[in-house]
Amino acid sequence: AMDSFRLLTTESQSEAEGLADKLEDLNRQRRDISEKAFTLALEQVNIRYSGGLPPIVVVQDPRINPGVSGLVAGRLAELLHRPAVVVCGDGDRLVASGRSIPAFNIVEAFEACQSLMVRHGGHAQAAGFTVERDNLPALTENLTAVAEEALAHTDLQPRLAIDAQVRLSELGNGVTDWLSTLEPFGPTNPAPLFLTTGARILGIRYMGNVGQHLKLRVSDEGNEWNALAFNQGEDASGWISEGDQVDLVYTVISDRFQGPGALALRVVDFHLSGG
């Protein structure tokens, strides 16, 4: 915080440049930590909920840095369209951050289960708690029951507000720099949502323990991209084939598995073109 203040108040050009570089390095480190933590959280989602997602997801991994658990919970809530809780720590007491969707007041849910918590606090869309490790299974069960009672199926479906219709050829290298100026993304600042029509499916791969996730290779005008559709594999298995043309609604994300700087499409919704 002091470096940020000094950057705003210094009259020295060289000091300002040094502080700006330092802050950029810190931001890059934080993004790397956040990306690794998000990957760990997704792995836990795949393991814990291979048979289907409940109305609230609770994941625990001691390797997740508590400093980014709120960001990770927010990304899970955005990705899965349901409230998400990320639990950190490896001692007798665990700490958790929760992020929600508009239809669910997460701090009220925590209050309904407070007898199983050491402490809790927050507001409707972002809250946290501390819990004894032995109480976490019962707490997870109770939170799930609260969410099942409060949320209808339609509450868990994405509401799409498309920002732009683009061709895949328009998603050049500069898109990463542009998107970084809009971060951090979360429930109150969602990532830009794009629509591409008539993309051709070049390859289909089902992922996850039971094929619940989908990885597509798509192309338009010779531009090929990986497209990841989480928890859409089962629904899509009966109607998509290689060679089909599809309309895609997606955000652009980093694809760490393909190497530094690689990008992919995170598919929010898709259907056959003309359907």
Image: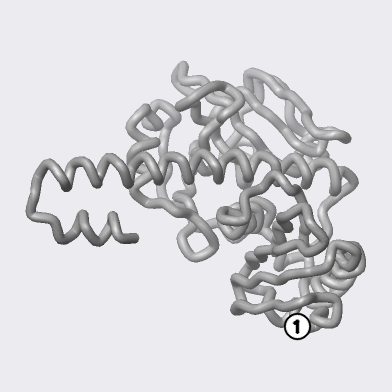
In the image, residue 204 sits, relative to residue 151, either above or below, namely above
Please name the residue shown 68% across and 29% down the image.
215
Relative depth, front residue between 196 and 20? 20
The image quarter containing residue 58 is bottom right
Please name the residue shown 63% across and 72% down the image.
127
Binning the other alpha carbons within 10 Å of mark 1 as few (below 14), some (14 to 19) or many (20 upward) gives some
Whether residue 265 sits left or right of residue 109 in the image: it is: left
Residue 237 image position (x, y, % from top left): 81, 33
Residue 220 image position (x, y, % from top left): 49, 24
Please name the residue shown 61% across and 23% down the image.
217
> Can you say which quadrant of the picture contains the N terminus?
bottom left
The image quarter containing residue 149 is bottom right
In the image, residue 33 sits, relative to residue 106, either above or below, namely above
The amino acid at mark 1 is: Glu
User: Is there any visible trace of residue 226 in the rendered image?
Assistant: yes
Relative depth, front residue between 9 and 87? 9
Residue 118 image position (x, y, % from top left): 77, 76
Q: What scheme was used to colour the molecule?
A: one colour
User: How many dots with numbers?
Assistant: 1
> Can you say which quadrant of the picture contains the C terminus?
top right
User: Is there any visible trace of residue 200 in the rendered image?
Assistant: no
Please name the residue shown 39% across and 36% down the image.
176
Residue marked by disc 1? 111
Residue 206 image position (x, y, % from top left): 78, 28
Relative depth, front residue between 145 and 169? 145
In the image, residue 44 sits, relative to residue 273, either above or below, namely below
